[in-house]
């Protein structure tokens, strides 16, 4: 199955010059969603992964079923003030300003091998912040899984020390 065909591209959204990759068309197709999760799981099986961590918010959509498929637990990385328990935070740079992410301090034990899941790899800024949070908790990043990779934005190069798996690539 060609998963790229299941993703709707919307030109000039949310602003002129942006070509938005809308995964809702893939998500509503049960077979495509099942295939997405299966391919991610198949790639990472046997690599000693002990926990799946999804990055807000579309990383939750893919990460939770991936955790079920692999028989693993699932933890969340969220925007500030969304998690009710004790959290660790990290601030990171955006094109214009900063943002931050948080994770519960009891998401996993130190030494846990973690797979980070998100829908899209662009510049790698958000994922680099997620990796920093995992390291702050004493976790080991065993891999990074994405549905989509925008290769022209250089995220893979920024994160080259990690095992990166993406299902669909856009080169321009």
Image (cartoon, rainbow, N blue to C red):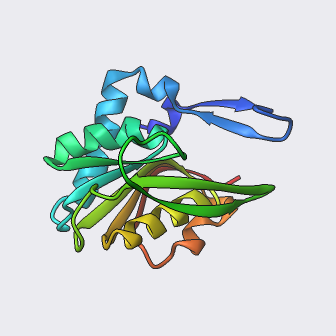
Image-based side of 56 in relation to 152, left or right: left
Q: Position of residue 48 (x, y in %)?
A: 17, 67
**Residue at the spot x=42%, y=27% of the render?**
27
| Quadrant position of the N terminus in the picture | top left
**Residue at the spot x=39%, y=35% of the render?**
61
- Give 97 or 30, whichever is nearer the viewer: 97
**Residue at the spot x=23%, y=53% of the render?**
42
Classify 21 as above or below 134.
above
Image-based side of 114 in relation to 101, left or right: left
Furthest-bottom residue in this view: 161
- Give 36 or 1, whichever is nearer the viewer: 36
Classify 161 as above or below 118.
below
- Give 92 or 84, whichever is nearer the viewer: 84
Q: Quadrant of residue 108?
A: bottom left
Q: Position of residue 151 (x, y in %)?
A: 62, 60
- Give 64 or 109, whichever is nearer the viewer: 109
Classify 137 as above or below 12.
below
**Residue at the spot x=27%, y=43% of the render?**
66
Q: Position of residue 60 (x, y in %)?
A: 39, 39
């Amino acid at each position: 199955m060609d998963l790229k065909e299941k993703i709707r591209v919307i030109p000039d959204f949310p602003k002129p010059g942006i070509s938005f990759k809308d995964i809702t068309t893939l998500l509503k197709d049960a077979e495509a969603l099942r295939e997405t999760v299966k391919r991610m799981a198949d790639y990472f099986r046997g690599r000693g992964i002990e926990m799946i961590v999804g990055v807000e918010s579309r990383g939750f959509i893919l990460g939770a079923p991936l955790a079920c498929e692999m028989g693993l637990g699932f933890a969340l990385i969220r925007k500030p003030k969304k998690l009710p328990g004790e959290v660790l935070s990290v601030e990171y740079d955006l094109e214009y300003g900063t943002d931050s992410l948080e994770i519960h301090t009891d998401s996993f034990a130190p030494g846990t091998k973690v797979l980070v899941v998100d829908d899209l790899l662009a510049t790698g800024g958000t994922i680099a912040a997620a990796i920093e949070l995992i390291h702050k908790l004493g976790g080991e990043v065993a891999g990074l899984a994405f549905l989509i990779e925008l290769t022209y934005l250089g995220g893979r190069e920024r994160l080259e020390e990690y095992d990166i798996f993406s299902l669909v690539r856009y080169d321009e």
